[in-house]
Image (spheres, coloured by chain):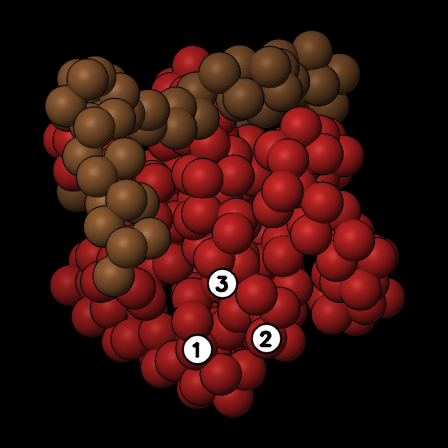
Chain colours: A brown, B red
Amino acid sequence: MTKLLIDRQFPSSDSIASRRNFNAILDGLPKKKTINSPWFYGAIGFSTVFLLILLNFFM
Amino acid sequence: MSASLLYFDRFGKPEDEFAIIERAKRNPEHFAPLYKKYHEAIFRYVIKRVDEEESAYDITSCVFIKALTNLPKYEYRGIPFSSWLFRIAKSELYQSFRDKKAQRTVSIDSMQLGKVMEEFQLDESEHKREVLLKVLPLLKEKQLQLIEMRFFEKRSFREMGEILELTENNAKVKTFRALTKLKELYSKYNNQK
């Protein structure tokens, strides 16, 4: 059921402005995903990339 | 001054915002001027529909976080940026009603209620006001939304259409139908008394 509120008092413009916090908005943004997998950065990952480059070079 | 003139006075011309939006798409920190410009308007839109001030501040923050997250997808296609923000606010509000099982609130100013009574060609007697207030919540959500935006928030049909994703003409027609429904409910309730 909808609630009706008559002649309600709303906060003033100054009071609303005092609650503005752009840094909180920036902090609330989803963080960009970083790749943490050892397969990407580890020895296996590097050697796979190296092998692919090598294969590409000789073929 | 007409409602549509007020609309553009309030938010300026959409072209003025393009450069800021393009910069903010690359770096969210550039969004600050738009946040400052629209924060109060979005907050007032939200607080009229929820009864707790703190919830209204939280929902407003969610609106701007969502807007910034989705900003790379925003393209100007004739819909002002302000209306895009109000659309996000509308969806965040309904999400909040669902999540918190909260009650939908309609905030009415006595003066604005007088405008609805004028539309009904009713004189402002206490009894008639009471009947009108009793039947308003009986409208369907979409109808109530139209009455609320047109009479209690004084929005133009153009702005209403942009926020509700309707054409200007469709917003006009649907508002007329909502008023007709309200009149029907009013007569029914008034005759029962």
Callout 1 secondary element: loop
Q: CA distance from mark 3 to mark 1?
A: 8 Å
**Which mark identifies residue B163?**
3
Mark 1, residue position: B166
**Which mark identifies residue B77?**
2
Callout 2 secondary element: loop
Q: Where, quadrant-wise, is the C terminus of chain B in this rendering?
A: bottom left
Q: Which chain does the numbered disc 2 sit on? A: B
| Residue A37 versus residue A58 in the image, above or below | above
Q: Name the amino acid type tagged 3.
A: Ile
Q: Name the amino acid type tagged 1.
A: Leu
Q: Residue at x 21, y 39 (%)?
A: A51
Q: Where, quadrant-wise, is the N terminus of chain B in this rendering?
A: bottom right
Q: Which chain does the numbered disc 3 sit on? A: B
Q: Which chain does the numbered disc 1 sit on? A: B
In the foreground, B58 or A46: A46
- Mark 1 and mark 2 residues within 8 Å of each other at the beta carbon: no
